Image: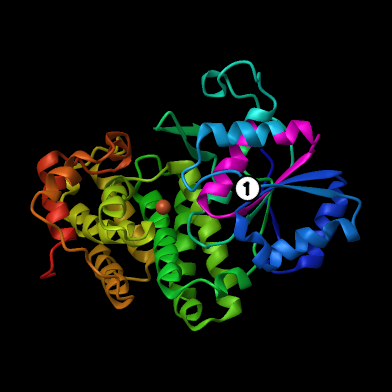
């Protein structure tokens, strides 16, 4: 696959030039209903006045997109004879657009989920509205079929170009800014220690970690340059998890979100800040085939990405960062722990370099949710 093209952030004339050069005649724009209130919405509305290109809107999907939503999108793409896809949004819009792109060239008389995916060259422009998911850089999408979660993965659904508008971050509430930057940080940290890590993913992870720390303050103060830096950090961390996938932090965080209604990045950070010291203390239980010494070396490299002397100092820095952002800890009921324990996806745990059994997961959840930390 060719490199993803990053259009200069916030530069709408550069976006015009990119589209002009592509020379497509009809774009399927996958977006939420609120897009008309954003600058990027106005951009696409006026686009046909500047370039010989039409824009067909598709907003017929729910936050946890269903297979049927994708079918409607594929049908619209074909009926309107679109030749390009653009997605404006966070995780869901991006996932819908990814699946429309993949399924468009496949047999509509059979269930797409059961067919082999064939790569296609439809241009795909992603305009993320938050700097956190990194979804615009990954080959993964999640949709629901008959109530069951389905993971779709193919290199051909990675957007071919990305446009960030720093001003999109300006309108986010502080809690969303904090949660999304924490999501980016967790992607970077988890990719770094994943059993699937490579030299390339570690370099991307380290770069993203440095960028999050460099731009966090500015994002909260509303500095436009820092918005651009955080978008880039999120994209880079997305590229890292595209290689490695996430680990225990993400496996353990999903139930915290559904049980207590906290944001995804908030939940991931509460988990990752406990997993970090846990790993330092349990390198002997390493399941990374590269061995315990490799894991210790990885934790030392991670510490240096944190600009710290060693792993313990880095774990403390992460803990302090989450605490200083004022991320609250939910108040659990005793019966919650059984629900939390059984919620963890074992596939994600296989990516985690240290063995975690049920007793350890339970102990970790008690620490994560402890009010006396
Ligand atoms: Fe995440």
Q: Position of residue 222 (x, y in %)?
A: 53, 81
Outermost residue, bottom direction? 221
Q: Secondary structure at mark 1?
A: loop
**What residue is at 45 percent from the left and 80 percent from the top?**
217
Q: Which residue is mark 1?
A: 59
Nearest the viewer among 309 and 161 is: 161
Nearest the viewer among 90 and 318 is: 90
**What residue is at 30 percent from the left and 68 percent from the top?**
318
Quarter that holds the N terminus: top right
Q: Position of residue 48 (x, y in %)?
A: 87, 56
**What residue is at 48 percent from the left and 37 percent from the top?**
143
Q: Height in image: 287 above or below 202?
A: above
Q: Height in image: 245 above or below 161?
A: above
**What residue is at 55 percent from the left and 73 percent from the top?**
171
Q: Position of residue 242 (x, y in %)?
A: 50, 44
Asked if residue 121 can be seen in this view, the reply is no
Q: Position of residue 308 (x, y in %)?
A: 32, 71
In this rendering, position of residue 313 left or right of residue 140: left
**Residue 340 counted in the magenta span:** no
Nearest the viewer among 271 and 371 is: 371
* Range covered by the magenta-colored residues: 76-102
Quarter that holds the C terminus: bottom left
Q: Few, some or many C-alpha atoms within 10 Å of disc 1 (few <14, some 14-19, many ≥20)?
A: some
């Amino acid at each position: 696959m060719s490199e993803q093209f990053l259009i200069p952030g916030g530069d709408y004339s550069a976006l015009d030039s990119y589209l002009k050069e592509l020379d497509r005649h009809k774009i399927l724009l996958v977006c939420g209903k609120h897009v008309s209130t954003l600058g990027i919405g106005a951009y696409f509305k006026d686009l046909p006045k500047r370039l010989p290109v039409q824009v067909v809107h598709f907003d017929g999907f729910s936050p946890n997109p269903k297979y049927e939503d994708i079918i409607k999108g594929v049908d619209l793409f074909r009926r309107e004879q679109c030749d390009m896809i653009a997605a404006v949004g966070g995780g869901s819009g991006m996932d819908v657009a990814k699946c429309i792109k993949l399924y468009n060239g496949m047999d509509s008389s059979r269930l797409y989920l059961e067919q082999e995916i064939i790569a296609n060259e439809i241009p795909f422009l992603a305009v993320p509205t938050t700097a956190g998911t990194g979804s615009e850089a990954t080959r993964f999408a999640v949709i629901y079929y008959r109530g069951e979660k389905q993971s779709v993965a193919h290199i051909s659904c990675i957007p071919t170009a990305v446009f960030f508008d720093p001003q999109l971050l300006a309108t986010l509430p502080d809690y969303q800014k904090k949660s999304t930057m924490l999501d980016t940080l967790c992607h970077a940290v988890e990719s770094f220690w994943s059993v699937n890590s490579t030299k390339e993913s570690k370099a991307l992870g380290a770069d993203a970690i440095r960028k999050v720390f460099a731009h966090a303050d500015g994002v909260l103060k509303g500095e436009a340059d820092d918005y651009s830096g955080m978008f880039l950090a999120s994209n880079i961390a997305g590229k890292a998890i595209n290689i490695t996938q996430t680990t225990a932090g993400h496996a353990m965080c999903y139930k915290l979100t559904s049980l207590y209604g906290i944001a995804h990045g908030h939940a991931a950070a509460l988990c990752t800040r406990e997993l970090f010291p846990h790993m330092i203390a349990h390198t002997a239980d390493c399941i990374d085939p590269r061995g315990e010494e490799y894991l210790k070396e990885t934790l030392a490299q991670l510490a240096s990405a944190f600009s710290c002397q060693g792993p313990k100092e880095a774990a403390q820095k992460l803990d302090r960062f989450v605490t200083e952002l004022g991320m609250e800890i939910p108040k659990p009921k005793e019966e919650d722990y059984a629900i939390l324990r059984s919620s963890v996806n074992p596939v994600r745990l296989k990516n985690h370099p240290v063995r975690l059994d049920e007793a350890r997961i339970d102990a970790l959840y008690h620490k994560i949710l402890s009010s006396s930390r």
